[in-house]
Amino acid sequence: MAIQFISATKIFKLDTNKTSYILQVNGYGYLLHHYYGAYIPDSEMDYLGYTVGHSSFSPGVPCWKNGEPYFSKDVSRMEYSCNGCGDFRGSALSIIRSTGTADTDIRYVSHKIYAGKPQIVGLPATYAAADEATTLEILCIDEASGAEVTLYYTVFEALGAMTRHVSVKNTSDKMMNIQRIFSTCVDFHDARDMDLIHLYGSWAMERKFERIPLMHGTQVISSKRGASSAMHNPFIAVCSHDATEEYGDAYGFNLVYSGNFVASAEMDTDGGARVLMGINPEGFNWKLEAGESFTTPEAVMVYSNEGIGGMSRIYHRLYRNNLCRGEWKNTRRPILINNWEATYFNFDEEKLYDIAKTASELGIEMFVMDDGWFGDRNTDKSGLGDWFVNESKLKGGLGKLVDRVNDLGMKFGIWFEPEMVSKDSNLFRAHPEWALQTPNRPMSIARAQYVLDMSRADVRDYLFDCISQVLDNANIAYIKWDFNRNLTEVGSALLDADRQGEVFHRYVLGLYELLERILNKYPHLIIEGCSSGGGRFDPAWLYYAPQSWTSDDTDAIERLDIQYGTSMCYPVSSMGSHVSACPNHQTNRTTPLTTRGHVAMSGTFGYELDLTKLTDEEKEIVKGQCDEYRKYYDLINKGDLYRLISPWKDRTRCAWSFVSEDKNEVLLTYVVIRGGIYDRHYVRLNGLDENRYYRNVQTGQVLSGKALMNAGICIQERLRDYESRMYHFISVN
Ligand code: DGJ
């Protein structure tokens, strides 16, 4: 049984094949956290929750009970911390009740345990069949306010992952305001030897890996941009100081949400640490009328004692199998050519057709027409919102171009930036009130555009109709869904003053509703998420879009960092990755076409350059790359990723591999960042079967799994800056 309730001690034990998570209801009805980590058979873990010395600064519970020990939340490990009643660390829940006071105090009422996993209405979340997961719901009540709080836990037994979310119902007859409501809260008993990992960045340098020791006090990672953002990702991990890629404790936390978020780790004076994750309370204030409920997004928690790599591989499997949905979850996605870096805004139908034709000859399977096909859009200064084909650019209309591309044997994809409106657009002239704005304040402008108020049903209906109009009139297989600025002056003309604190979240809910509606109508569609590259790369997108454009930086060497960091929790099958022209448009760096191919193949593969300008020799290389990608598709996209040499270790090289689930095949990629004269190129593999022998398909060499993992392979070549090698190993016994 994956989840047990031991009634004598009121202990809940949530197990997966490799992990245990233990909490208990104490004599006062409070939920205490006892353990999260590697599986332990013993359920009597309440000894971990002993009372430590406290002073007069640690208040005890009101309503003292005879016989119960002194209990102070201040010095206890709490399961879901509340504000204002004696737990002075960061709180997961804070509700302003009708009295105007922000004091919240929840106690256990009842619980349910059942097979499977409930949906979270209106929000993306992992899903599971009845035999894949078990769920625990714990109902608590704050009697003073009438807030009924349900904590949801789902364990994915075979995968070793668990998810949490929370809902609050106002059972009183008065209004209350939710100030903060996080999706998860975990109190670690001892975090003195732990590090924090997070992914920071910016445009064109998303999800850089940073690892720092936990310090006393609070370390906070967050976004209040209205999007999960390129600057910080809704992912953190805490791991032991000695954790490596393959060894040590690593705990991952990832929020399935595309809006404002917070993730924090707070180390207390006693060395314990509280991790919190959820919607960012800044800019959030949710009015809950009598009888209404509010539900948080889901946090996905993964523990591995096989290091940071072990943690990542659990996330990858869970997201590939239990978060991605629909036809393209398992079907091979087409190799694409996107015209953005080939033409920018400067194209007509013949130019696009020429690129598509060359692409089709090289084995590329889908042509994607990027920005500039609609309205009066010849620069980024105008046209967003006017989603009508610009026939002076695409003579004969969109249908004709799509048919011609289809006749080449290729699918057709198209770019949209639905959530935006250009200041210079017919849509903005007709409906200025559709843009987010606040009274008597000028609207900040970015890339000459404003953000539409996605909380409004009329805005969503307009966008749905525009997108439908395009999809109904041409055979379109794919949409690139872009989002190129963040939210400012966040107010909605349709909401009352006391509901303006809901706009950020209502925006995200509106976005999800529109995506769901489109996918319901067009179930065969592939959506690729994008936000000036990877500015909204989060797990929520995986529910709607099996792939997201990882970064506008297409330089193969910069991509090493970006893809390495992104792989902390996101599977390579989700990372849009393209070969582009050299010198690279972002960095001016020149790298070999082969290396660009090797790096882009560790993602959803495509091209983004003017293929008509390639030499015959380059075209042959491209043809070969497409064949290789098709050949290795399953290994790359369904295999286990092992990060072998980190690109930021000494910035000289980088290596990673994919190992098939049955350990029969391995694909190794090795890239030299800076090749020294005396460099030798050894790479130790990982994840192989040490009792088997493997043949290197490229060199013919046969080595044991033990040799490959302990001594490694030796690439006996003088490799120069930016050169790369890819080797395929097949088990011979
Ligand atoms: C930003 C995207 O990341 C690019 O790939 C491209 O689609 C441009 N927007 C178009 O405006």
Image (spheres, rainbow, N blue to C red):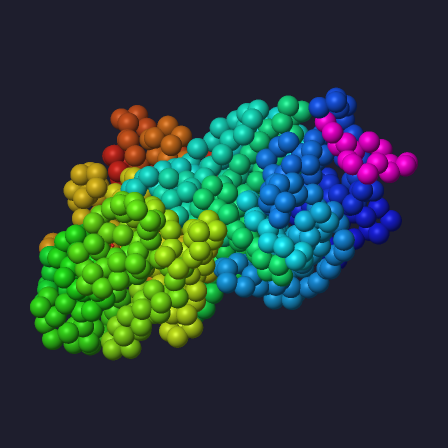
Q: Nearer the viewer, residue 317 or 46?
A: 46
Q: Measuring from the top left, give residue 480's x and y in whole percent.
A: 30, 60
- Work out which quarter of the rendered image holds the N terminus and state it: bottom right
**From the viewer's perspective, is 531 left or right of 345?**
right
Position of residue 331 in the picture relative to residue 141 (left or right) = left
Q: Pick whichever, 294 or 54, lies toward us.
A: 294
Whether residue 361 is visible: no
Please state the horizontal and vertical placement of residue 36, each as a whole percent of the image: 67, 41
Q: Residue furthest right?
A: 67
Horizontally, is 414 left or right of 128 in the view?
Answer: left
The residue shown at (55%, 44%) is: 180
Residue in the image at 30% along x and 56% along y = 435
Question: Is residue 612 covered in magenta?
Answer: no
Name the chief secondary structure element in magenta.
loop
Total marks shown come to 0
Q: Is residue 274 above or below residue 575?
A: above
Q: Which residue is rendered at x = 18% and y = 69% of the image?
A: 389
Q: How far across and how far down the image is residue 68, in percent?
A: 87, 36
Q: Is residue 152 above or below residue 199?
A: below
Q: Which residues are magenta?
A: 58-72
* 228 lies left or right of 691: left
Is there any visible trace of residue 498 in the rendered image?
yes
Tell me what residue is drawn at x 34 percent, y 30 percent: 651
| Image spot of residue 201 (x, y percent) | 36, 38
